Amino acid sequence: MSTPVLKVEKLRKTFGDEVVLQDISFTVPEHTATVFIGASGSGKSTLLRCINLLDQIDDGVIKLDGEDISKADINPDEVRKKLGMVFQSFNLFPHMTVLENITLAPTKVQGVASEKAAEEAFELLERFGLREKAGQYPDRLSGGQQQRVAI
């Protein structure tokens, strides 16, 4: 069996005296999609923020590609090159085209050449049925299209 892409073991997160996440454990195998479902305030966003190293966990282990990313000496910026989050409000830049939104992180954060980033962006847009929207601005897209661009 291959190493899971993501493995969370006995994760615990508190805010002051309030326990928000307690004994959370799961694995995400390679090439799968995972969905977190729960009531408002149940900790879904907090869990994702912990995985993305936006919030520090109190206890437990988070492994990404077999590497323990919950250690104190880990560089969050390096981890975030491998992870992404799509927020409920999508957070696309309104003054940038679809293509510019998609290529921004690879070129600015990961140092990918603009041409290579655009090539990969067009491939992704094709997969999501949005290639013809590459030159449009987010306000010209439906909510579902904006969400796919954000992904």
Image (cartoon, helix red, strand yellow):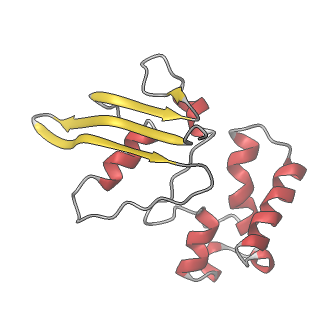
Write the residue at 81% across / 41% down: 112
For the residue pair 96 and 102, the one nearer the viewer reads as 102
Q: Residue 15's image quarter?
A: top left
- Image quarter (top left, top right, bottom left or bottom right) of the C terminus: bottom right
Which residue, as the protein is rendered here, is positioned at the far left? 17
For the residue pair 107 and 14, the one nearer the viewer reads as 14
Write the residue at 76% across / 44% down: 107
Write the residue at 73% across / 78% down: 129
Counting from the top left corner in percent of width and height, residue 96 is at 69, 64
Counting from the top left corner in percent of width and height, residue 98 is at 71, 68
Indicate whether 79 appears above or below 137.
above
Q: Residue 83's image quarter?
A: top right
Indicate whether 109 appears above or below 42.
above
Indicate whether 17 appears above or below 114.
above
- Image quarter (top left, top right, bottom left or bottom right) of the N terminus: top right
Left or right, residue 128 beside residue 132 = left
For the residue pair 138 and 131, the one nearer the viewer reads as 131
Left or right, residue 104 beside residue 50 = right
